[in-house]
Image: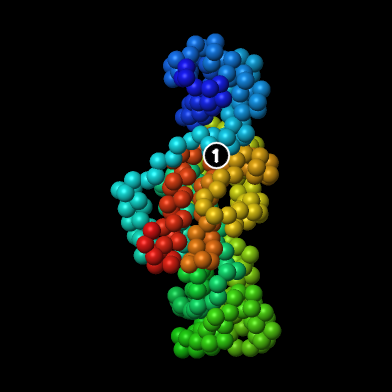
Amino acid sequence: MDNLSTLERNKKVLEAVVHEFTVTAKPVGSKKIAPYFSLSSATIRNILCELEQAGYLWHPHTSAGRIPTDKGYRLYVDSLMEIEPLSQEERALITEKYLMMRRQTVELRQIIPSLLVNLANYPAITLTIWEKGAVSHIEFLKLDQRRLVIVLIMTTGITRDQIVFLKRERALDFLKELAGYLNRELGGHNLREVLSWLKARWPLDREGEEIVGHLLAMIEGTINGEISLEGVYMIAREPEFFDGRRLGGLIKTLEEKKMLMEIINRHRDQEGPWISIGQENLCPYIQDCSLVMATYRNHNETVGTLGIIGPTRMNYERVLPIVDFVSKMVTAMLTEEAI
């Protein structure tokens, strides 16, 4: 430490504060981190003051220790943290879990958040981009007399299914005939073209109108992107959200999804994983959180974004490689390429 420049020494102290606060969620004092350095507590206190004056730390009370600011976290994730790639064993286990879940359901919007929650222990997000690609296949699967599953498969590999209730029973032959007709007419067209065609050519009194109406509603509800969340309850375990009002505002914002979609869409074309910290998220109720996200693709087409939302003091060194690997794995699975 004695051979380090003042700048490098201060960065090391900031790094120590971030690590300690990540674990304890308590303001960090000089005595807590002094054992990591060959410096006195008084010298550490001076460094903490310098970091605070520069905007990298703040302290909630006069006598309390310091807490990293958004600026401090930004410096940390951009230039201080050391990321260790996942081991080969971890990568194999994640891939095995993904394939097992994939066999149980074809919808990535269900698989990805569930997988990420189990890996990172923070709430997980997936934004599925439906406007890319074209319709590959439409299918109507009869569950019973009045229940039907509408399945929509895109050329990007993205799949959507929805159970609907019918006013009257439909024969299997009719369902197959209707699906076949729509596939012949709509296969290879993007969803906006599909919507225009259906609205223009499917009069209300036409046979099958009820089923096509459900298909229209499903497409209209997803065409601008669809956010799936898993593990939102986990955020309540974090000390930052023990305050009921703060927690309630965050959960309401997550459930409404509009602000989340705006934040994610700003980074839609960004290469590689990205991190949005605290006030960078603009929405007041998400400013105690960070997002660690990455896009996934089918060949060169971005078809979705996946990632984690957690407190700004989340363990970035652990979360980032998980998000990065899962995005690459899903991309490889969709394009049938090896990672």
Spot occupied by residue 43 in the image (x, y as percentages of width and height):
54, 13
Q: Which residue is mark 1?
A: 78
Relative image position of residue 119 (x, y in whole percent):
41, 46
Most extreme residue toward the left is 89
Q: Residue at x 40, y 41 (%)?
A: 84
Task: Report the label total.
Answer: 1
Q: How is the image coloured?
A: rainbow
| Relative vertical location of residue 183 with respect to residue 130 in this rendering, above or below | below
Type of amino acid under label 1: Asp
Residue drawn at (65%, 82%), measured in percent from left and top? 197
Q: Of residues 199 and 87, which is closer to you in this image?
A: 87
The secondary element bearing badge 1 is classed as helix
At horizontal 39% and vertical 44% (from top left) the residue drawn is: 85
Q: Which quadrant holds the C terminus?
A: bottom left
Q: Quadrant of residue 334?
A: bottom left
| Place of residue 173 in the rendered image (x, y in percent of width and height, measured from the top left) | 46, 89
Q: Is residue 199 visible?
A: yes
Residue 248 visible within the image: no
**Circle 1 residues within 10 Å: few <14, some 14–19, many ≥20:** few
Above or below, comparing residue 75 to residue 165 in the picture: above
**Image-quadrant location for residue 204:** bottom right
Residue 241 image offset from top left, x and y in percent: 58, 35
> Is 227 situated above or below 4?
below
Residue 168 vertical placement versus 66 (above, below): below
